[in-house]
Image: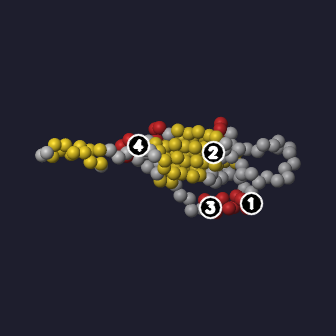
Amino acid sequence: MLMRTDPFRELDRLTQQFFGTTGTTSRPAVMPMDAYRSGDSFVVHFDLPGVSPESIDLNVERNVLTVKAERGTDYDEKAEVQVAERPRGVFSRQLFLGDTLDADNIRASYDAGVLTVRIPVAEKAKPRKIAISGAEGHTEINA
């Protein structure tokens, strides 16, 4: 699995924390994630606390997985806000999926503010045995 890298992502995150800026459609806020391989699939966890499941958009196009979500305010526009430190606005992240992953069978779930995406390894990428014929019969070895 290959992930899109953005050299300014960490700088954006620090700027957002320091100045309290929110994500916009043109410059989405940072969406922290963890990714690891577990058996025959890759598992990716995206932190989206306080985001409604209906606002999460997950799609795959040409082996690029895109996650977008939006978190609005919990209070009325007329409210007199004293402190607003929780990130809000638009969040987005893209991952490039390698050819060895099965993009047609991706599964996703959302629980306790964490979006979990499971991407299976394609059958063609899994190890398999190949029979070798010889003068004394057939022998199998791992390929």
Say which of marks 3 and 4 sits in front: 4
The kind of residue tagged 4 is Ala
Where does label 1 land, which residue? Answer: 19
Q: Is residue 27 left or right of residue 39?
A: right
Q: Give the image quarter of residue 72.
A: top right
What SS does tag 1 mark? helix
The kind of residue tagged 2 is Val
Q: Give the image quarter of residue 73.
A: top right
N-term-proximal mark, 3 vs 2 = 3
Q: In the image shown, does 31 or 124 lie closer to the viewer? A: 124
N-term-proximal mark, 3 vs 4 = 3
What SS does tag 2 mark? strand
Q: CA distance from mark 3 to mark 1?
A: 14 Å
Say which of marks 4 and 1 sits in front: 4
Where does label 4 land, which residue? Answer: 122
Q: CA distance from mark 4 to mark 1?
A: 44 Å
Q: CA distance from mark 1 to mark 2?
A: 25 Å
The kind of residue tagged 3 is Glu
Say which of marks 3 and 2 sits in front: 2
Give the vertical position of 97 relative to 11 (above or below).
above
Q: CA distance from mark 3 to mark 4?
A: 32 Å
Give the vertical position of 10 relative to 32 (above or below).
below
The kind of residue tagged 1 is Phe
CB under 8 Å between callouts 3 and 4? no
Residue 114 tag number: 2
N-term-proximal mark, 1 vs 2 = 1
